[in-house]
Amino acid sequence: LNPPEQGSYHHFYYAVGHLFWYYADPGQKAGVTVLACPWTPGQDAVDISRAVARKCPAGQTTWAYGQTGGKVITVTNWGGVYVFDGQGWTSLRDPDGKSFQVYSALNYYDRVLLGQYPSGCVYEFDGQTIRLKEGWPPRLPGASASVREAQTTTLYRGDLFVGVWPWAEIWRYDRDADRWHSLGRALTGPPVSDAVNHPYEKEI
């Protein structure tokens, strides 16, 4: 894939026989484009003429892709949620000017879990829709309920682990018991508080 004559390609992902990336052209104020282009490892080049494009509002990029059931989901930093089904793009959520950011995507049984800000919980994508799973994970007593970020998600020995910013909370979900367990915090200080949104907010 040759670089564009102007602008940049960024945030690459490969799934379901397609190479995905975002294209930002500073000369066009109309926005950015996310592309899905058929490609197989071993091909000499990417035939960009076969790419299926989806226009997004200006200033958008992504921090997470996910896939399930032959579909690929990407979420922009402004909350645009777009799904590619192998043929074309569908929007599940258009940006509305409010914070909605996804920092991680994890396949969990037949769902993709999307670690979201500012709820601090995960959304689940079932291949058709996205839905907030409130209380997944919970929050430590005394922690502010605002501007929380389910920043990291992973599996270990069958359990789901979620790390939550800004208080460095670590949570483990036991699916058999249908119960969340707090593993404490990754940082010893400063103390958890609901008087500020995040540590050192005033100092910053």
Image (spheres, rainbow, N blue to C red):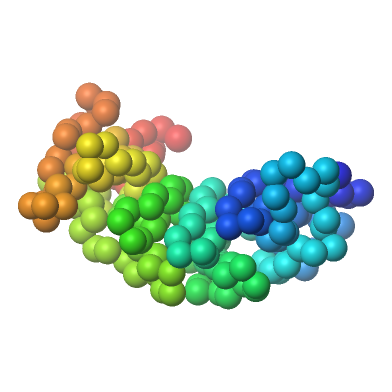
Position of the C terminus by quadrant? top left
Q: Residue at x 43, y 69 (%)?
A: 127
Residue found at the very far front of the displayed protein? 42
Q: Is residue 185 above or below residue 24?
A: above
Q: Is residue 96 above or below residue 45?
A: below
Q: Is residue 194 visible?
A: no
Instruction: Indicate the position of residue 98 as horizontal and vertical percent values.
Output: 48, 66
Q: How many marks?
A: 0
Camera-side residue of 96 and 181: 181
Instruction: Indicate the position of residue 67 as horizontal and vertical percent values.
Output: 48, 57
Camera-side residue of 14 and 193: 14
Q: Residue at x 33, y 36 (%)?
A: 199
Q: Residue at x 39, y 58 (%)?
A: 112
Q: Is residue 136 visible?
A: yes
Quadrant of residue 86 within the rendered picture = bottom right
Tell whether 174 sits left or right of 52.
left
Camera-side residue of 63 and 19: 19
Residue found at the very far top of the displayed protein? 188
Instruction: Indicate the position of residue 52 as horizontal and vertical percent values.
Output: 73, 67
Instruction: Indicate the position of residue 175 as horizontal and vertical percent values.
Output: 16, 52
Residue found at the very far left of the displayed protein? 177
